Image (tube, rainbow, N blue to C red):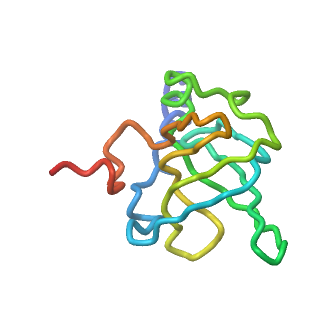
């Protein structure tokens, strides 16, 4: 009985997983320059929070979806790879609902490093499509 319950509970996160095209628009690229405020390594996707200041000084908080924690951890990306308060540049794709959410492709750091944020699977993102 415990095994059946464990298997049922393990299947719940799989139902919540979605394809890139279900939530994000490949025709709406975003370029975010801001300050990293938080990194959440939670399943099924990592979330990176960035505060972006516009020309008038108004700050907008963005949530950037990245690959799964397991994929990022295998690439050496941990919760502590980028300290809160670090200026970053994120390239990605806008959410279809127009909210301040994006699917991240890359994040660039002040020292010149560029880290790939996408998942390793076939998500449907433009950079992963086969020709």
Whether 21 is drawn above or below 35: the answer is: below
The answer to whether residue 69 is left or right of residue 126 is right
Whether 125 is drawn above or below 80: the answer is: below
Whether 110 is drawn above or below 15: the answer is: above
The quarter of the picture where the N terminus appears is top right
The answer to whether residue 59 is left or right of residue 89 is right
Residue 38, by quadrant, is top right
Residue in the picture at 59% in, 36% down: 112
The answer to whether residue 54 is left or right of residue 94 is right
Residue in the picture at 53% in, 36% down: 115
Residue 23 percent coordinates (x, y): 47, 65
* Residue 105 or residue 11, whichever sits in front: 105
Asked whether residue 21 appears in the rendered view, the answer is yes
Residue 6 percent coordinates (x, y): 55, 27
Residue in the picture at 83% in, 73% down: 58
Asked whether residue 12 appears in the rendered view, the answer is no
């Amino acid at each position: 009985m415990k095994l059946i319950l464990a298997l049922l509970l393990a299947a719940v996160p799989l139902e919540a997983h979605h394809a890139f095209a279900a939530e994000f628009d490949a025709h709406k690229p975003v370029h975010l320059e801001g300050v990293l405020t938080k990194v959440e390594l939670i399943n099924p996707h990592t979330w990176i929070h960035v505060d972006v200041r516009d020309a008038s000084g108004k700050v907008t908080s963005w949530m950037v979806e990245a690959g799964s924690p397991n994929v990022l951890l295998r690439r050496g990306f941990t919760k502590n790879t980028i300290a809160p308060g670090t200026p970053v540049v994120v390239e990605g794709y806008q959410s279809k609902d127009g909210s301040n959410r994006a699917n991240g492709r890359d994040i660039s750091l002040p020292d010149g490093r560029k880290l790939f944020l996408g998942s390793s699977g076939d998500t449907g993102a433009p950079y992963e499509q086969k020709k």
